[in-house]
Image: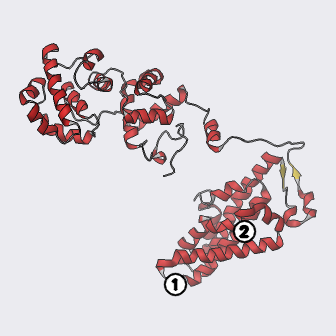
Amino acid sequence: MNWNEFKTLAHNGLWKQNPGLVQLLGLCPLLAVSNSLVNALGLGLATTLVITLSNTVIAPVRSYVPNEIRIPVFVLIIAVLVTVVQYLMNAYVYGLYLVLGIFVPLIVTNCIVLARAESFASKNPMLPSAVDGMMMGLGLTAVLATLGGMREIIGKGTLFSGFDLVFGDSAKSWVIHVIPDYHGFLLAILPPADARRLARGGTGMNAAKRREIFLRLQAATPHPTTELEYHTPFELLVAVILSAQATDKSVNLATRELFPVANTPRKILDLGEAELRGYVQRIGLYQTKSKHLILMCKILLEKHDGQVPQTRESLEALPGVGRKTANVILNTAFGQPTIAVDTHIFRVSNRTGLAPGKTVLAVEQKLMKMVPNEFKQDAHHWLILHGRYVCTARKPKCRECTISDICEYKEKTAV
């Protein structure tokens, strides 16, 4: 290994590929023990020793380890070395060893150690591997020490407190009182979830958060619309009636065959209920829906000249049309700012805290009251698409969610 290779490894470990800053590895000890400079340095240097030794051991034996079992073998080597370091700390810096506690044996689970063994030591000679391990460890130690020093100053107003655990009573004189007569600083006493809520600006949904939710949903889908296929208000009305307790996909498959044959009230009446069933039989409750469609077409021809009415009262008077269906037609076909609440929107509204309610009507009324006017026209589509593809019922995709940081859901998923 020449000087240039050494400089490259040093630069990568200390800065360019720093485990804590760039690779974002080892974050558990980074946060757990970095409440003081001595703790941070202690765990950082212990981890550095383990990474250096494990890389040094793994590099020369890598060619003798079958590829299929290399990871278990690497973990075994790391575990042995962690035990050695644990015994050394127990023997020579017992006070620090007690303070660090479980985090010393847990070095074996630190992903930085195994990552360097797998990505570098298993592919390079011993000396470069040893240098790589040392530099990666020192890079992590530098981050730990920086954070530990800052937290010690904020929490105690001191620096170098606790160094007597390593260097004896003489080190007590090393303590620097950065902030004289400091009585500490309470960061938080809330449970983690509530602390995160408070950090986001409050403990509940508010107008600013609601507006931000819709701004983000709008940015993700600027021109949302229904996934049902239609060309006229009547076709949309038929499709929405058929979609009750059925998927849009199954409805579209049916209407692609039905609409070329019958796409007006008169044509569906001429088709007849029996033949209509043949087109929609792949959809749940198709017999009841076929009967409703025939009756609906009769009323449209008798009372509305074959046209879909544009008022809620007239729509809800039609067979098979309830409040939700009426809202969809008024919104999508006629551009009225209504919000149809289905199971997806009901779930999203309650889960996010956007408009919680015990009934569909209660959620709808809250949404109509709480959603800013500029978003009401498309709110129904944004929320249903979000519930259908992101905020799913069994396993919401919180990591993919554009509003997860302002959502009030307490049980966010990690995957």
Whether residue 2 appears in this view of the structure is no
Q: Earlier in the sequence, mark 1 or mark 2?
A: 2
> Residue 272, how many percent across, how many down?
8, 30
Q: Which quadrant of the structure image shows residue 393?
A: top left
- Quadrant where the image shows the N terminus: bottom right
10 Å neighbourhood of mark 1: few (<14), some, or many (≥20)? few
Front residue of 46/123: it is 46
- Mark 2 = which residue? 46
Name the element at disc 2: helix
**Whole-number angstrom distance, CA of label 1 to CA of label 2:** 27 Å
> Residue 397, how many percent across, how many down?
45, 47
Q: Residue at x 77, y 59 (%)?
A: 39
Number of marks in the rendered image? 2
- Mark 1 = which residue? 63
Check whether the beta carbons of the residues at disc 1 and disc 2 lie within 8 A of each other.
no
Amino acid at circle 2: Ala
> Residue 384, how many percent across, how many down?
37, 35
10 Å neighbourhood of mark 2: few (<14), some, or many (≥20)? many
Front residue of 273/123: it is 273
Q: Residue at x 59, y 62 (%)?
A: 17
Q: Residue at x 38, y 35 (%)?
A: 343
Q: Looking at the image, is 212 positioned above or below residue 388? A: above
Q: Which quadrant of the structure image shows residue 14?
A: bottom right
Q: Looking at the image, is 385 positioned above or below residue 315? A: below
Q: Residue at x 84, y 66 (%)?
A: 166
